[in-house]
Amino acid sequence: MEKTKIQIIMDDIICKIKSGELRPGDDLPMNRDMQKTYNCGRWTVWDAKNRLERRGIIDPGSGRGGPGAYGRHTTVSLLAPYLL
């Protein structure tokens, strides 16, 4: 079965955390950059980040839309290495 773009984004972020490319406290790429990287819409990026947040892997920042908006300050959770 083919992976959805949401799963591809999630897997890529998790892989980057496991490899050390993304470390706890690091900012994730901005949504616009992720849309270009994964060739998808904003809701796909939002959904992937939302699922990672619910698993405790990322912490939503206070971007333009406020907490939970997944703006420019979404970071890797300090607990992420222990949850993966």
Image: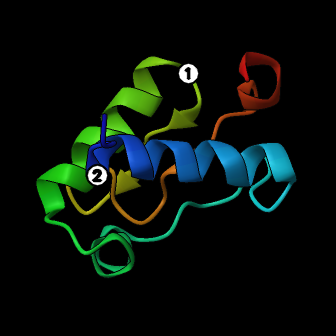
Res. 39 image quadrant: bottom left
82 to the left or right of 13: right
Where residue 53 appears, as percent x and y from the top left, is: 44, 29
Q: Amino acid at mark 1?
A: Gly
What percent of the width, then of the height, locates residue 22? 74, 57
Residue at which label 2 appears: 5
Q: Badge 1 is on which residue?
A: 56
Q: Residue at x 56, y 53 (%)?
A: 12
Left or right side of 74 for 45: left
Decide: marks 2, 1 in contact (CB < 8 A)?
A: no
Whether residue 25 can be seen here: no
Which of the 4 image quarters holds residue 56? Answer: top right
How packed mark 1 is, by other alpha carbons closer than 10 Å (few <14, some 14-19, many 20 or more), is some
Q: Earlier in the sequence, mark 2 or mark 1?
A: 2
Badge 1 marks a residue whose secondary structure is: loop
Q: Quadrant of the N terminus?
A: top left
Quadrant containing the C terminus is: top right
What residue is at 28 percent from the left and 77 percent from the top?
A: 32
**For numbered disc 2, what is the local secondary structure?**
helix
Alpha-carbon span between mark 2 and mark 1 = 20 Å
Q: Residues within 10 Å of mark 2 (few under 14, many from 20)?
A: some
Check the image and name the residue furthest to the right. 20
Up-down relation of residue 65 to residue 58 (above or below)? below
Left or right: where 68 falls relative to 81 = left
Q: Which residue shows up at 55% across the image and 37% down it?
A: 58
Question: Please, what is the three-letter code of the amino acid marked with disc 2?
Answer: Lys
**Vertical order, 73 against 78 (above or below):** below
Query: Looking at the picture, how far across and down is residue 62, in whole percent?
Result: 38, 51
Measured from the top left, where is residue 73 in percent x and y? Answer: 48, 59
